Image (spheres, grey):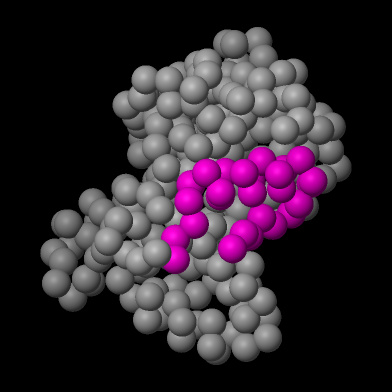
Amino acid sequence: MKDLSAKTVLITGANRGIGRALAREYAAAGAHVLGVARCPAEDPSGGAVEWIAADLSRPDGWTRIIEAVAGSGRTLDILVNNAGIQQAIDLDATTAEAFREKAQAEIAVNLVAPLCLAQGLIPHMRRPGATIVNITSILSRHPKASAPVYCATKAGLASFTDALRLQLAPLGIHVAEAIPPLVATDMTAGRGGGSKLSPEAMARAIVEGVARGSKRIAPGLSRAFLMIDRIAPEIAAAMMAKS
C-alpha cells in the first residue's frame, strides 16, 4: 500500500462497518485519521485515530467537526462522508409523529450532514489535491419499497455529488461517489445471505479508487448492477423493488 503518512483523512461513522474498515486501511498506510462517531470506539483502526465525538443528526454536531478540523491546524486531504442510517418505514402503518421523527433523523444523517460537512470543510482542504468521497447506494438509482426515506436521501446525495464535482473542479478538489453493494454491516444484518461484500473489501476499493482519481467507485455486485441499469433500467428497477 502506498505510504500516506503526509495525509489527513476524516471519516464519519468510523466506529463500525465500512467506516471502521476505512480507518484501519488509512491508518495502516500511515495517514492521520480523524474518526467521527457519536460514541467513539477504542482504537478501531489498529493504529492511532484522533476521535471527534459528534452527533450527525444535529447541526451542533456538524459544527463541532468543522471547528475541530479548523482548530487542528491540519489541511484535510480526504473527507469520507460514510455515516448513514436506514429504517424500514411502512407509511400506511406509521403515525404522522413517528414518521416525522424517523424521516428527520435519516435526512439529517444521510443527506444534510454530508452536504454541510462538504461545504464547511472546503476552506480547510488541500487545493489542488484533496478528495471528497460521498458514500451513496445502488438504491440511489432505483428505490426499494421498505426504506423510502433512505432511498430518497441517497438519491439526493448522488445528485449533490455530481453538482459538487462540477463546482470544485476549478479548485483542484476531486469528488468521488462510492456505491457499495450489500455490505456485511450491522445495517444489513439478516439480509443478503452469503452474497454480501465485506467491509474490508469495500474499504480497499474506496482507498484504491481515491488513489486512482475515480469518479465512481462501485465494486462487486454494484458494478454489475450499474451495467444492467445502463442497458435495461426497467430490469434494474424491478430488482431493487423486490430487494
Q: Is residue 64 above or below residue 106?
A: above
The residue segment tinted magenta is 195-220
Residue 10 drawn at (x, y percent): 57, 29
Closer to us: 46 or 170: 46
- What residue is drawn where x is 53% and y is 30%? 24
**Residue 8 visible in the current orientation:** no
Place of residue 150 in the rendered image (x, y in percent of width and height, measured from the top left): 39, 60
Q: Nearer the viewer, residue 22 or 87?
A: 22
Vertical arrangement, residue 75 with respect to residue 109, above or below: above
Which sits in the foreground, 154 or 15? 15
Residue in the image at 50% along x and 37% along y: 21
Left/right placement of residue 57 relative to residue 232 reads left
* In the depicted structure, whether residue 144 falls above or below residue 117: below
- Left or right: 77 in relation to 181: right
Task: Give 236 or 25, whichever is nearer the viewer.
Answer: 25
Q: Is residue 58 magenta?
A: no
Residue 200 counted in the magenta span: yes
Q: How many marks?
A: 0
What's the residue at 17%, 57% (across, down)? Answer: 98
For the N terminus, the quadrant is top right
- Relative to 1, say whether 148 is above or below: below
Residue 220, percent from left and from top: 59, 63
